[in-house]
Structures are given as C-alpha cells and as structure tokens.
Amino acid sequence: MTDGARRTPKFPLRLDQMSVAKQKAASAPPAREVLRPQQPLQHAAATSARKAMPTGLGLDSAGVRRRMVERLRQDGLRHEAVLAAIAHVPRHLFVDAALATQAYEDTSLPIGHGQTISKPSVVGRMIELLMGGANARTSGQPARVLEIGTGCGYQAAVLARLARQVYSVERVKPLHDKARELMAPLRIGNVRLVYGDGMLGHPPNAPYDAIIAAAGGESLPAAWIEQLAVGGRIVAPVSDNGVRQVLVVVDRTEQGCERSVHEVVQFVPLKSGLVR
Ligand code: SAH
C-alpha cells in the first residue's frame, strides 16, 4: 500500500487544506476508479517456501523488531502502545520468504497483485493518528475499527493489538485468502476479514470508532463518513489535485465533521468493485 511518507509536504498546500477546515463531509463523492493490469500472485510458491524457510532472521526476530521500533521512535513515533504493537507483530511472516530479510527495514514490499505491504513508519504514523480520535482517547482504545485494504493482513494484525475488534475489507479475493492464511497461525481472535468493496465501507458492523484506509482515492467515500460513529476518526490517503496524496484525518462530532490535512504519502489507488 504505501511508501515514501514525508513528514513535511514538499509542495505548498492549498490554503483551505492547511488549516483545520470544517467541512460538510456527507457531500463527498465516491473515489474514482483507477484501472491497473493485474499481476500474478505468487501465493502457493510463497507459502510452501515459507514452511521450509530459514528466514535469515535467526531465532531473534523480536530483537530485530525492537531495533526497528527504536528507529521509529527516533524518527518521531511517540505512541507507546502503537510502538509496542509494532514490536509484537512478526512482519517477516507477512512477506515472501525471499523478502523476509528486508521485513524490518522501513520499506514497503510487494505482496502480489501489484499491491504492497505498508512501510512500518507509515503504519505507525497512521495508527498513531487513529488513536488520537475522541472515542479512542476516551476509552483508551477504539472499540471498533474498520480497515480498508487488508492486503497481506500486517496492519490488521497491528490494529488487533490496539482495538477491541477489527473488521478488514479487501477487494482482491486472492489477497483476502492469503491474509487469512498468513494470520491463522498467529491466532488473532479479534480481526474479521471481509472480502468486499471497501469503498462501500462495511455496513453490517457500523458505526466504527475508527476507519483507516490503506489505499487512496480522489476523495473520501461518503459511506465511510456515514459509518463513522460520533467521536470516531477516519485516517486515509486522499489525492490532492490529482498529483500527489496527503493523509487526511476526519473527526465526526455532534455538529458535523472536522477535517485536517497532514503529510504527503504514497499509497496504491483505492479502486471500486471486486477482483475474483
Ligand atoms: N494494510 C495492508 C496494505 C495493503 S495495500 C498491509 O498491511 O499489507 C492496499 C490494499 O488495498 C490492496 O490490497 C488493495 O487491493 C486494497 N484495496 C484497494 N481498493 C480497495 C477497496 N475498494 N476495497 C478493499 N480493498 C481495497
């Protein structure tokens, strides 16, 4: 999903985006579909390789993770619970065996179908923002989180350490299946993986205290706003003038929605419809 988040936007933001602007969010149109050729998923091969794999990480992947977390802390990630969650989840198990030695570098990696696992720093940053939502702050954790774009399931596994219940939607069936397979050995009881078009949110379990998107569209789909609880927060990449993406935070209040714009990011496109 992501890459290349920069803390400081390189280009001038429009004035209305620099300040926290109150917006009538329900008027947001659905994101535009962006078509891309599919790439084969090396799923079966990766799975069998993983079973026999010496990861090259030795027995101390926890130690490698701790060092990665220290680097994230030095780079400005401050939320201790988020850092602890990242320190806990074995990211190397979510990528192909051949990429396992790169799993604890701060880089995105391919997961098949033209998609990528997010950079740890971007996962951390987005979840840190998510934890700043009113409901998450009040109760210490968001009770119900909706993730758009399961991918390989890594971010869902991190979210599971921080939220009571996570619903994660993926539109590409082979990726949805792969995430299920990768997560099974971790025995995570509070993530429900959903095969569906996340642009429609996931109405059965709405409202959500937090919605986090791992893919970016032209605007925030109206369904996400509609399915956000009062006191809930959305963190999502949104295209800014079609040239680049910025992280957008939307807080739902009794009065409406407040929107703020954060750093420039690079996520895969949010697409509508399903891939079988
Ligand atoms: N969170 C993932 C990142 C996956 S990349 C991880 O930790 O690995 C982003 C994912 O969003 C891709 O798998 C892509 O297929 C998915 N995606 C894009 N548009 C979507 C939509 N409308 N609904 C659900 N998933 C979508």
Image: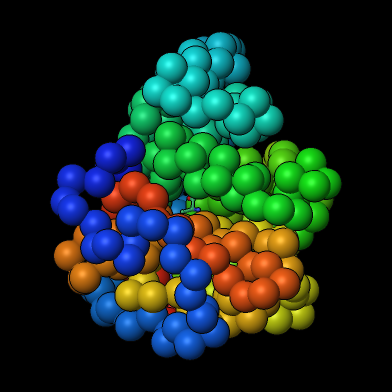
Q: Please indicate whether residue 60 sits to the left or right of residue 228 in the image.
A: left
Q: Please indicate whether residue 215 sits to the left or right of residue 251 in the image.
A: left
The location of residue 166, given as percent across then percent down, is 71, 57
The residue positioned 34% from the left and 47% from the top of the image is 263
Which is more toward the observer, 157 or 176?
A: 157
The residue positioned 27% from the left and 62% from the top of the image is 15
Q: Please indicate whether residue 159 sits to the left or right of residue 68 in the image.
A: right
Which is more toward the observer, 220 or 192?
A: 220
Instruction: Residue 260: tell me if it is visible.
Output: yes
The residue positioned 50% from the left and 58% from the top of the image is 249
Q: Quadrant of residue 204?
A: bottom right
Q: Quadrant of the N terminus?
A: bottom left
Question: Taking 205 as reference, is 44 above or below it?
Answer: above
The location of residue 244, given as percent across then percent down, is 22, 60
The location of residue 151, given as percent across then percent down, is 49, 57
- Counting every numbered tag in the picture gives 0
The location of residue 205, given as percent across then percent down, is 77, 74
Question: Taking 85 as reference, is 187 above or below it?
Answer: below
Q: Quadrant of residue 187?
A: top right
Instruction: Residue 50: tell me if it is visible.
Output: no
Q: How is the image coloured?
A: rainbow
The residue positioned 58% from the left and 71% from the top of the image is 257
Question: Taking 90 as reference, is 96 above or below it?
Answer: below
Which is more toward the observer, 132 or 145?
A: 132
